[in-house]
Image (cartoon, rainbow, N blue to C red):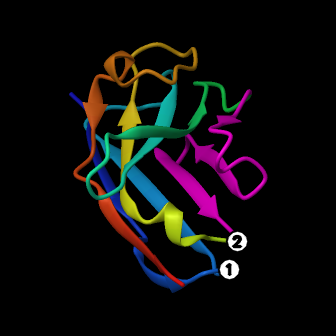
Amino acid sequence: QVQLVESGGGLVQAGGSLRLSCAASGRAISSGAMGWFRQAPGKEREFVAGISGSGGMPYYADSVKGRFTISRDNAKNTVYLQMNSLKPEDTGVYYCAARDRSSNSRREDDYRYWGQGTQVTVSS
């Protein structure tokens, strides 16, 4: 079993930055791909960013490309999401997720473990 705990959310003005962290416990996540998803009020949860088990091949939703950066520190069992140039439309609950496989995926169903989420609110 893997437990994921997100932190770093909050309220920020448009144009600002936040750094989300996802700490894993229970077992090492070094071999599995990790992803960040978000859910805006009244909308379905959507993929934001993902990174393979080795830390290579990060990839992003088009809406955040060039503004967000996903990274991982396997020694700390932690994944990060650096969010810059935030926009009001980035508002939502951000979830960290972990796969058993090392390959990337944008599909929610491919992720076995999920955190409880952290709220990000961007004011205009």
The picture quadrant where one finds residue 18 is: bottom right
Q: Residues within 10 Å of mark 1 (few under 14, many from 20)?
A: some
Q: Secondary structure at mark 1?
A: loop
Numbered circle sitting on residue 85: 2
Kind of residue sitting beneath label 2: Ser
Give the residue at x 62% y 64%: 83
Kind of residue sitting beneath label 1: Gly
Numbered circle sitting on residue 105: none
The picture quadrant where one finds residue 108 is: top left
Give the residue at the far right of this rendering.
Answer: 66
Instruction: Please determine whether, in this image, residue 73 is positioned above or below residue 20.
Output: above
Q: Secondary structure at mark 2?
A: loop
Point out the tag, 2 or 1, that comes first from the N-terminus: 1
**Quarter of the image that includes the N terminus:** top left
Give the residue at x 52% y 48%: 79
What x and y, as percent, mark residue 3? 24, 41
What x and y, as percent, mark residue 63? 64, 47
Q: Which residues are magenta?
A: 57-84
Is there CB contact under 8 Å for labels 2 and 1? yes
Q: Would you say 46 lies left or right of 42 here?
A: right
Q: Would you say 39 lies left or right of 78 here?
A: left
Is 107 colored magenta in this rendering?
A: no
Residue that label 1 marks: 15
Q: Residues within 10 Å of mark 2 (few under 14, many from 20)?
A: some
Is 71 colored magenta in this rendering?
A: yes
What x and y, as percent, mark residue 122? 48, 77
Instruction: Please determine whether, in this image, residue 23 is positioned above or below residue 32.
Output: below
Give the residue at x 79% y 52%: 66
What x and y, as percent, mark residue 44? 31, 40
